[in-house]
Image (tube, rainbow, N blue to C red):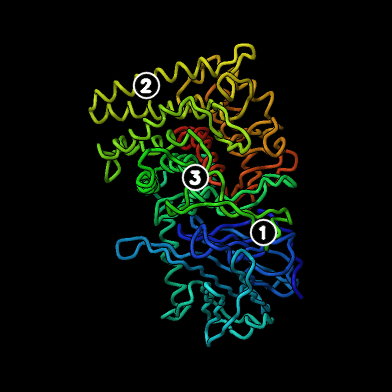
C-alpha cells in the first residue's frame, strides 16, 4: 500500500549545482525542478499543483507500507539523504544531488540530477514513479523506453532518465523488491556513456569533496556554525554561475500569506537582493560569487548605455520578463494564481544604483582577490553614480515594489547617497583626488537633504518617505549604510517606533499600512534580521540574541527559510528558499557570535 501524501508545505530540502536545482519534500519526492536551468520550465511542479493531490509533476521513490521518514544533508554538502522505513522496520535510503566539481581547471555543473535508492535493513519493496509535465503543467509527455532508460517527450521538450533499475517496473509504476543499490540519472535526452553505478560513485565523491572543500575555507562565526554553513551553501545554489546572476528564490508564486494573491515569480536577479547575497558571502570569505556578479553587471551595463538600471533582470541579461498567469497549475495549496515573469522589470526603483556600487566596492579593497577593481570598473560605476545623483530625490516604487503608487522613498535616497559615498572612498584608493572631492561633495550634499527631509519632527522619528509620516522596516538600514550612527538619537527613536508599530511577538512586519493588496499579515523575515542587527548596534545585544535564537528555531527541519513567516503559527510562507532570509541569518550570526578567542579559550 502507498503512503498518504502530506499537504504541500515548505518542509523542503534543496539540491543544486548553480545551474539547476530541485526541491525535495520530507518523503523524498522531487516536487519542484526547473529545467534546464533555474528559470526554466518546471518539469516537476506538483508543489504548485493544488492541495497535495497525487496527480503529476513529481519524481517519487516510495517504500511499501511506509511508516516514517528521516532526512538530512551529508555534512557540509548539498547532498541530501532521505531514509524511509516501513511498518515492519525495514528501511531504504535515497540520496539526491546535482553534480558540481572541478574538472579540467573549471567547474563542471551538468544539467543533471542523480538519485540513488539502496536497502538499509530488511527486504523492503519500492515503487518509482516519474511523472514530469511540460509547459508549466499544460503538457503530458509521451514515454519511450529503452533497455536502460525512459525518455519523456513532447514537442520542444525532451528529458531522459537513465537507470540500472528495472525499466518496466518504472514505466508501469509497479512495486518491486529492492535487493541492491539502484541509480537514476535525470538529464537531457542523451545517452549516458558509462555504467550509471560508476558514474554516480565518481560524481558523488567529487561533488562531496567539492562542497566540503568550499565550506572549509569559509570564515564562519564560532556560534551557530551549522546554520551559517547551510545558509551559505543555499546562497551558492541560488547563483546562476554561467552568467553571474543570483536569483531571489528558486520558486514562483508561493504566496506571502494565504488568500492574498501576493504570488510572485522570484526566479530572476534583483540587483538589490544580489547585493545582499554578495555582502553575506563576502563576510564569509566566499568572494568568487562577487566576482561573477560583477561580470553579470558588466553585461547588464552594456545593455543600458544610459546608465539607467531596471530593478530586476533575467538570469541571462537582455531577456524580457513579461508577467502572465499560467492556467494549468492550481497554485500552492490551491492558492492561485501562478505567475511567470515579473512586472517589477518595468518599475522605477532608484536604490539599484547604490546596490551595484556597494556590491562592487570590495573589489577595490580586498587584496585577496586575484583581480582588483581598476579604472575601467570605476568608470562604469561612476556612470551609475551619475544616475544616483539624478534619481536620489525622484519618486519610485521603492524597496517593497508598490504597484499602485510612487513616492520619494527614504531607503532609495539613502542608497543613492551610499553610491556616491562609496565612489568617493574608491577614488581615494585609486589615487583619484579630483574624483574623491567631487563624489564626497555630492554625498555630503545628498546626506544633508535626506536627513532634513526624512526626519518628521512632529512624530519624533524618521519617515519611510521624504516629507511623509509612514513607517517601514527599511529605516533600520540607515545605520547599516552609515547614513547615521547607531547612537544617533534620531535612529534610536526610529527603532523604538518600529518596535511599537511593526513588531508582532518576536517577528517584524515590513510595514503595517495597506498596500495594493491590503495590509500584510506575515512577517518579512529579513526585516526581523535587520531588527536583530539594529538591537545589537544600539547595545541591546542580549535581546538580539534571544530573538535570533527564536527565528533559528523556526527554520524548517533542514535549516532553510522562505520569505515570510506567520507570527502566530511560525509557518513559513513565500518563495523558497529566499536569499534575503538566508543572508539575514548569516549577517546576524556574524554580528552576534562570540569571538573564537572568547568562546574557545575563555568560554565554558
Depth order, front residue of 403/168 = 403
Whether residue 514 can be seen here: yes
Q: Position of residue 306 (x, y in %)?
A: 37, 38
Instruction: Identify the image quadrant of the C terminus.
Output: top right
Tell me if mark 3 has few (under 14), some (14-19) or many (20+) residues whose alpha carbon lies within 10 angstroms of its own: many
Q: Nearer the viewer, mark 1 or mark 3?
A: 3
On the image, numbered disc 2 is attached to which residue?
A: 442
Question: Quick check: 351 above or below 108?
Answer: above
Q: Is residue 90 left or right of residue 389?
A: right
Q: CA distance from mark 2 to mark 1?
A: 48 Å
Q: CA distance from mark 2 to mark 3?
A: 27 Å
Element type at marker 3? strand
Element type at marker 2? helix
Tell me if mark 1 has few (under 14), some (14-19) or many (20+) residues whose alpha carbon lies within 10 angstroms of its own: many
Dot 2 and dot 3 residues touching (CB under 8 Å): no
Count of numbered circles in the view: 3
Q: Earlier in the sequence, mark 1 or mark 3?
A: 1
Q: Position of residue 296 (x, y in %)?
A: 38, 48
Q: Position of residue 403 (x, y in %)?
A: 61, 38
Q: Earlier in the sequence, mark 2 or mark 1?
A: 1
Whether residue 559 can be seen here: no
On the image, numbered disc 3 is attached to which residue?
A: 312
Question: Quick check: 375 above or below 295?
Answer: above
Q: CA distance from mark 1 to mark 3?
A: 23 Å
Element type at marker 1? helix
Depth order, front residue of 342/452 = 342
Residue at image point 62% right, 71% down = 139
On the image, numbered disc 1 is attached to which residue?
A: 48
Question: Quick check: 318 above or below 278?
Answer: below
Q: Earlier in the sequence, mark 2 or mark 3?
A: 3
Tell me if mark 2 has few (under 14), some (14-19) or many (20+) residues whose alpha carbon lies within 10 angstroms of its own: some
Q: Nearer the viewer, mark 2 or mark 1?
A: 2
Amino acid at each position: 500500500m502507498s503512503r498518504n501524501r502530506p499537504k504541500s508545505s515548505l518542509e523542503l530540502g534543496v539540491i543544486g549545482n548553480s545551474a539547476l536545482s530541485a526541491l525535495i519534500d520530507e518523503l523524498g519526492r522531487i516536487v519542484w525542478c526547473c529545467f534546464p536551468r533555474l528559470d526554466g520550465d518546471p518539469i516537476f511542479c506538483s508543489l504548485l499543483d493544488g492541495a497535495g493531490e497525487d496527480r503529476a509533476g513529481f519524481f517519487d521513490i516510495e517504500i511499501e507500507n511506509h511508516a516514517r521518514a528521516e532526512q538530512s544533508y551529508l555534512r557540509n554538502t548539498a547532498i541530501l539523504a532521505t531514509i524511509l522505513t516501513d511498518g515492519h522496520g525495514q528501511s531504504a535510503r535515497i540520496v539526491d544531488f546535482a553534480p558540481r566539481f572541478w574538472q579540467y581547471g573549471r567547474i563542471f555543473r551538468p544539467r543533471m540530477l542523480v538519485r540513488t535508492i539502496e536497502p538499509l535493513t530488511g527486504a523492503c519493496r519500492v515503487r518509482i514513479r516519474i511523472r514530469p509535465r511540460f509547459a508549466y503543467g499544460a503538457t503530458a509527455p509521451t514515454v519511450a523506453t529503452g533497455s536502460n532508460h525512459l525518455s519523456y517527450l513532447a514537442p520542444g521538450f525532451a528529458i531522459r532518465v537513465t537507470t540500472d533499475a528495472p525499466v518496466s517496473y518504472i514505466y508501469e509504476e509497479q512495486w518491486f523488491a529492492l535487493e541492491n543499490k539502484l541509480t537514476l540519472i535525470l538529464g537531457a535526452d542523451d545517452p549516458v556513456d558509462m555504467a550509471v553505478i560508476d558514474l554516480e560513485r565518481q560524481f558523488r565523491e567529487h561533488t562531496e569533496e567539492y562542497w566540503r572543500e568550499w565550506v572549509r575555507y569559509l570564515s564562519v562565526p564560532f556560534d551557530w556554525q551549522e546554520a551559517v554553513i547551510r545558509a551559505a551553501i543555499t546562497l551558492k545554489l541560488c547563483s546562476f554561475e554561467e552568467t553571474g546572476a543570483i536569483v531571489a528564490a528558486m520558486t514562483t508564486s508561493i504566496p506571502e500569506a494565504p488568500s492574498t494573491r501576493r504570488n510572485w515569480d522570484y526566479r530572476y536577479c534583483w540587483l538589490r537582493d544580489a547585493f545582499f547575497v554578495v555582502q553575506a558571502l563576502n563576510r564569509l570569505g566566499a568572494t568568487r560569487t562577487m566576482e561573477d556578479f560583477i561580470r553579470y553587471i558588466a553585461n547588464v551595463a552594456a545593455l543600458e548605455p544610459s546608465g539607467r538600471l531596471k530593478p530586476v533582470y533575467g538570469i541571462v541579461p537582455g531577456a524580457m520578463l513579461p508577467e502572465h498567469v499560467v492556467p494549468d497549475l492550481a497554485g500552492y495549496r490551491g492558492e492561485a494564481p501562478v505567475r511567470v515573469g515579473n512586472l517589477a522589470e518595468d518599475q522605477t526603483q532608484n536604490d539599484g544604483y547604490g546596490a551595484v556600487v556597494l556590491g562592487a566596492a570590495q573589489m577595490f579593497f580586498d587584496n585577496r582577490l586575484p583581480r582588483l577593481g581598476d579604472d575601467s570598473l570605476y568608470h562604469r560605476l561612476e556612470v551609475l553614480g551619475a544616475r544616483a545623483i539624478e534619481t536620489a530625490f525622484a519618486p519610485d516604487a521603492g524597496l517593497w515594489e508598490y504597484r499602485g503608487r510612487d513616492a520619494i522613498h527614504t531607503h532609495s535616497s539613502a542608497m543613492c547617497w551610499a553610491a556616491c559615498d562609496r565612489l568617493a572612498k574608491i577614488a581615494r584608493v585609486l589615487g583619484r583626488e579630483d574624483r574623491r572631492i567631487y563624489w564626497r561633495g555630492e554625498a555630503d550634499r545628498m546626506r544633508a537633504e535626506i536627513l532634513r527631509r526624512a526626519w518628521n519632527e512632529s512624530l519624533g522619528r524618521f519617515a519611510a518617505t521624504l516629507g511623509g509620516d509612514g513607517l517601514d522596516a527599511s529605516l533600520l538600514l540607515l545605520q547599516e549604510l552609515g547614513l547615521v550612527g547607531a547612537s544617533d538619537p534620531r535612529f534610536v527613536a526610529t527603532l523604538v517606533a518600529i518596535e511599537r508599530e511593526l513588531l508582532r511577538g518576536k517577528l517584524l512586519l515590513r510595514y503595517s499600512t495597506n498596500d495594493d493588496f491590503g495590509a500584510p499579515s506575515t512577517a518579512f523575515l529579513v526585516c526581523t534580521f535587520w531588527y536583530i542587527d539594529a538591537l545589537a548596534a544600539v547595545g541591546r545585544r542580549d535581546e538580539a540574541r534571544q530573538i535570533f535564537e527564536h527565528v533559528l528555531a523556526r527554520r524548517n527541519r533542514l535549516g532553510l527559510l522562505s520569505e515570510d513567516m506567520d507570527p502566530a503559527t511560525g509557518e513559513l510562507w513565500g518563495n523558497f528558499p529566499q536569499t534575503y532570509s538566508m543572508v539575514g541569518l548569516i549577517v546576524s550570526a556574524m554580528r552576534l557570535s562570540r569571538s573564537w578567542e572568547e568562546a574557545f579559550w575563555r568560554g565554558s
